[in-house]
Image: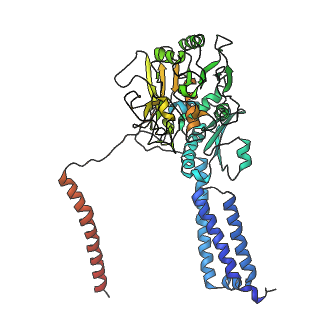
């Protein structure tokens, strides 16, 4: 039974909708490279549109199938299907017998020997579950290439899968995903969360999962520090939650009650005390550090604490005398590179070359009301200590020492009494003798819930914890630095000859050959 004639006129519109749906599906897939809900919906619209068009005008379909174009089209379709079948078969064989060649001079696309050893020694299956939305297409592509190398070297013990946290919120909630571009590494019921798809991060997660020992980090309390599980803006629950996702055991320690540091402490975190630590507490820290312990110290300017401006700070004295790190009694003022309309909230001016900050380059961090941190500069050395810059302020910022001027209507102004630039906000130190580590920041607010999600603030804090707790003997990847090659022409004659050959000779040659061909054809017509 034929549809009413009045309905046939809608067939072309339905066909257009169908073709448009399939085109949209193809476009979305090419951009996102995921068969997600949007692609599925577009394919459904396309197929339904074409089906409706055929139902509305079946006579046109029958006429086309009986015509010469259909016969030719059928032959083309058979050839296309045969070609697709061959390609599918070839891809299947390649997938079953994969081989990779790294043709780069420095083998930068090959995993380090230490990583390969770890992957081939896996006795328990490992699965990486990556969550990347359409906003991180390039990052997903790089992560997928890296995970594929791990899969190949894992010999069946390492697998991975990708999901869109927006398109699959249930799975993202199941894995407690709070940030995009996150990878969860699972092994024997344990999980590690990493936020940078790099070989160092992935291999480090594998090592930690393969060696599930206690990784305890203690936060000092008793001086007005922030609550670890406090979800208010002043709390620390955001970064503490990230530490727990990396299988850290986070606990508190009050040195006013005990004079010993627990033996399982990988590091102590001193996070923004409102009153200075006592001499007795600092003595305990001294004994802990001398035994190879590590510290992460976040100290705010005195104007933010409950201590008098001239009050002694035993911990500051210890850091200067014991580690060579100076916490100045100032407040950083940055009129050029700071939080909007907040000159006392400086942004990072630059990062140093450190494992803590290497993966944060070009990502901003903000430090609300910070003091400057000094350390032995270039040309100055302290035996058995190795220093590294973490965060530098803008070169035009200064350390204000006249705190009364900050409350005046005209605001602070730089003078001779202030701390002159360059100013530093974070410094890391290695004790080469005891193997102890100290990372010092002149601000603690950057790790609070109010600012943890600003730029790379949370990552900076977590990376600092990872650095002070690391066991260097556990893994040390062989570094790979690609060779940089560039062609520098200083001879003017050579430059002119290249310019003449490329800009004049080559186009003129094409024109001459084209003219010859045209002339020859004219002669034979």
**Residue 74, image x and y in percent?**
63, 76
User: Residue at 82% across / 86% down in the picture?
Assistant: 1
Does residue 409 appear anywhere in the picture?
yes
Location of residue 40 with respect to 11 vertically, above or below = above
Quarter occupied by residue 202? top right
Of the pair 308 and 367, the residue shown nearer to us: 308
The residue nearer to you, when weighing 164 against 351, is: 351
User: Residue 96 location, x and y as percent?
Assistant: 61, 48
Q: Is residue 116 visible?
A: no
Q: Is residue 42 shown left or right of residue 337?
A: right
Query: Does 122 sit left or right of 107 as displayed?
Result: right
Q: Residue furthest right?
A: 1
Relative to the observer, which residue lies in front, 343 or 487? 343
For the C terminus, the quadrant is bottom left
The image's colour scheme reads: rainbow
Where residue 12 sits in the image (x, y, percent)?
67, 81
Q: Is residue 242 left or right of residue 397?
A: right
Task: Look at 62% across and 46% down and name the residue there.
Answer: 180
Is 330 drawn above or below residue 322 in the view shown? below
Q: Residue furthest left?
A: 493
User: x and y percent of residue 489 in the render?
Assistant: 24, 49
- In this picture, residue 383 sits left or right of residue 280: left
* Image quadrant in which you'd find residue 396: top left
How many numbered discs, if any? Answer: 0
Q: Is residue 145 above or below residue 469?
A: below
């Amino acid at each position: 039974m034929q549809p009413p004639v009045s309905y046939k006129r809608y067939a072309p519109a339905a066909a257009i909708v169908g073709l448009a749906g399939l085109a949209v599906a193809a476009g979305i897939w090419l951009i996102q490279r995921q068969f997600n809900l949007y692609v599925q919906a577009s394919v459904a619209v396309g197929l339904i549109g074409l089906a409706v068009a055929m139902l509305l005008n079946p006579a046109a379909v029958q006429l086309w199938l009986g015509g010469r174009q259909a016969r030719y089209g059928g032959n083309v379709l058979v050839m296309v299907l045969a070609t697709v079948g061959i390609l599918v078969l070839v891809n299947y064989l390649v997938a079953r017998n994969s081989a990779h060649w790294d043709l780069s001079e420095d083998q930068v696309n090959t995993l380090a020997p230490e990583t390969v050893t770890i992957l081939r020694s896996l006795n328990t299956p490992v699965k990486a579950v990556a969550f990347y939305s359409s906003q991180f297409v390039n990052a997903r592509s790089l992560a997928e290439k890296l995970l594929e190398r791990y899969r190949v070297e894992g010999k069946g013990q390492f697998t991975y899968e990708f999901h869109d946290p927006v398109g699959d919120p249930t799975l993202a909630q199941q894995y407690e995903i709070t940030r995009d571009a996150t990878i969860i590494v699972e092994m024997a019921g344990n999980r590690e969360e990493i936020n940078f798809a790099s070989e160092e991060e992935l291999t480090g997660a594998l090592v930690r999962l393969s060696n599930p020992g206690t990784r305890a980090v203690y936060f000092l309390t008793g001086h007005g520090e922030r609550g670890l599980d406090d979800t208010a803006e002043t709390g620390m629950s955001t970064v503490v939650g990230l530490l727990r996702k990396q299988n850290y055991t986070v606990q508190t320690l009050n040195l006013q009650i005990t004079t010993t540091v627990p033996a399982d402490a990988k590091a102590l975190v001193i996070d923004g005390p409102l009153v200075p630590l006592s001499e007795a507490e600092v003595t305990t820290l001294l004994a802990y550090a001398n035994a190879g312990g590590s510290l992460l110290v976040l100290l705010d300017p005195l104007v933010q604490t409950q201590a008098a401006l001239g009050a002694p700070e035993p911990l500051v004295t210890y850091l200067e005398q014991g580690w060579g790190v100076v916490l100045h009694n100032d407040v950083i003022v940055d009129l050029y590179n700071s939080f909007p309309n907040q000159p006392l909230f400086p942004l990072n001016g630059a990062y140093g070359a450190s494992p803590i900050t290497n993966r944060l380059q070009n990502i901003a961090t903000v430090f609300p009301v910070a003091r400057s941190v000094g350390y032995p500069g270039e040309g100055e050395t302290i035996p058995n200590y190795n220093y590294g810059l973490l965060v530098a302020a803008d070169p035009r910022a200064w350390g204000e020492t006249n705190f009364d001027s900050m409350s005046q209507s005209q605001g602070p102004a730089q003078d001779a009494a202030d701390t002159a630039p360059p100013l530093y906000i974070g410094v890391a130190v290695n004790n080469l003798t005891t193997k102890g580590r100290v990372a010092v920041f002149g601000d603690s607010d950057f790790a609070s819930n109010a600012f943890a999600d600003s730029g790379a603030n949370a990552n900076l804090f977590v990376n600092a914890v990872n650095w002070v707790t690391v066991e260097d003997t556990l893994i040390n990847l062989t570094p790979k630095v690609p060779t940089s090659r560039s062609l520098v022409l200083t001879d003017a004659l050579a430059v002119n000859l290249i310019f003449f050959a490329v800009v004049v000779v080559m186009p003129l040659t094409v024109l001459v050959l084209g003219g010859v061909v045209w002339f020859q054809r004219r002669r034979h017509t």
